[in-house]
Image (spheres, rainbow, N blue to C red):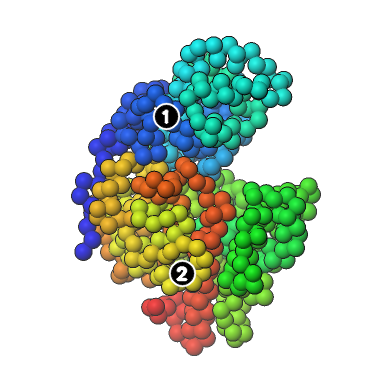
Amino acid sequence: MDRTPPAAKSDEIELYIRTYYSLLRSSGPVRIRSLEDTHMGMRSNLHHLADSADIDISALVYSALRLPDEIVDAQLVVMGQMEDVFEREGYSIEDWRTVKARARRRKYYYDEQSRTIAAFVASVSDIDDLVPCMTTFQIEWNKIHERLNNGRIRDRLLNQTDSAQSFSVDLPTVIGEALDLTPGELEKLGQLWPGARLLSNLQKAARNRLDLRMKVLGSGLGDYRRSVQHWWGKLESAVAHLNPWERPIYFVSSNTHSIANLVTGLSWELQHEILEYVRRENPEDLLTELNALPKDSDNGHLHNFLYYASRLYLSSLHNQAHVSKLVAERERAAGITRVSDPHCLDVEAQVFELCCIDHRQLDPRLRIFDEEEWKLLRESNALVLNIDYPLGMAAYHIFSQVSTAVGRIMGVYVLGKAATLNGRVGDVMIPNVVYDEHSQNTFLFRNCFTATDVSGLLNFGTVFDNQKAVTVRGTILQNRQFMHIFYEEGYTDIEMEAGPYLSGIYEDVYPQRYPVNEIVNLFINVPYDIGLIHYASDTPISRRQTLLSKSMSYFGVDATYAGSVAVMRRILSQEVTRMARLKKGANPLILPER
């Protein structure tokens, strides 16, 4: 039987986590610099040059993309769950400017006068994400500061005027030499801070060291629960006409585009416009990908391409009101209600009425029934609740709220990114064992998906089922020793949401809180599907590719849509079976085992 991996914790990582949580208990702001030594001692796999004088450009870019651009000007970052949490502490954030991070869905506000960033946190996972990112960024920023104050480069940089259209001819070379960066690393820095922002930020780095402070305003479990309840209240109001509290619900945690693309038919309807746009503008070098598509192929290559390119095409149109209206019309026809700003949590949601799906508009890979079976589906009262996958423990809070508020859960399907310890980027992992760092439980469960459900839909990668996954507390909170411990125990799939979802499922089934440090058997007593599909976006112990060196972008489309089609096939099949049993007078909420 599977067991909890021995020495599953890294002492250095645990020390770092204990340090920042103990400091955050302080009633006043805490300086990030007080964490730098323990951060370096952790020897994070994503920040392996933390204690080196060399600039770790990959770590700088990774952390900067998960923080708002205003971090370079900020002095204080305050974290809270809801507007009233900030209000009761004297922060009037409704008057502050809304800002965003490019690679992390989180609500941020910025006040120029006090140089303060307000960050909304949905769970402890947001703290476990924010604190290491801020520490990483500050360490690397201050390395740049030190190097730009060594020699004459500082004066030359500061004398370069903002009005200059570009650097003088040799200044990039001089900067690269001063920072000891390769041309490729300097190019990454230019991509992070494009145009005039590169000069502006280098000038700021030359003038000032970064000395960030942070403070958590509300850290009680009740504050997290209230924020999720408020989020659900907004969502429930938006779909009140559907009566979700009395309907069967298929719960999906994925993204906000793939399933909608599969059922609306909009991308296929606009295929000629989309392809012409790609040929004319070649966004993200997609023309190369278009020319490489197999000819006369019916295995989804072209559909996947259109789904990805449609986002770029629609966002390029000048008449955004017309675009929004067109998308809304197609989604409404497909029975989709979209809740784009549910408040508090930056987690978008969509509610689908299965009876409204028009099989003629479906992706061809979903046309799996005959006409009689489609008639059964049109009589269904079931809904699909699809949420934009949350970060870490927010998944637990959200599912706990949903499971107590809806009529009946019919299935839980989780599709998301993960790191793989034995595969390649683009591969798919289907686990049936999950070790959760939050609860220290090892969950055993029957995954409703197998390799055969996905492999026929995947064009490039490989599918591995019967895998063992580990849910970690944060991407930076890992080191090579930590990963090798799990690898030796056969754990090859590293992600952040499976454990919290399984904890929520446990509490939905059993009349008690989830246990701690146990082997939890979910093979029995769970009356609905559990389906987890992870696609590899990182190979952290491989030298070929890492999370920092390769963006998924178009490369991730194949695995994303293979998983999405598998999820929708399963939901449609389950619902047709349920409706057929209802027609025969059987209990429609009890489905035969697969």
Q: Nearer the viewer, residue 347 or 306?
A: 306
Drawn side of residue 511 relative to residue 300, left or right: left
- Disc 2 to disc 1, C-alpha distance: 41 Å
Residue 167 locus on image (x, y percent): 66, 23
CB atoms of marks 2 and 1 within 8 Å: no
The residue sitting at 28% across, 52% down in the picture is 487
Compare marks 2 and 1 and give the one earlier in the sequence: 1
Amino acid carrying mark 2 in the image: Ser
Of circles 2 and 1, which is in front? 2
Q: Give the labeled residue for mark 2.
A: 455
Task: Determine the image quadrant of residue 474.
Answer: top left
Residue 512 locus on image (x, y percent): 30, 57
Q: Nearer the viewer, residue 474 or 348?
A: 474
Instruction: Find residue 135 and name its label.
Output: 1
Task: Determine the image quadrant of residue 156.
Answer: top right
Q: Nearer the viewer, residue 160 or 483?
A: 160
Drawn side of residue 380 relative to residue 415, left or right: right
Residue 235 locus on image (x, y percent): 57, 54
Q: Can residue 572 be seen at all in this image of the molecule? A: yes
Crowd band around label 2 with a 10 angstrom C-alpha radius: few (<14), some (14–19), many (20+): some
Q: Secondary structure at mark 1?
A: helix
Q: Would you place residue 303 above or below residue 213 in this image?
A: below
Amino acid carrying mark 1 in the image: Thr
Residue 511 locus on image (x, y percent): 32, 60
Instruction: Find residue 170 and name its label.
Output: none
The residue sitting at 30% across, 47% down in the picture is 483
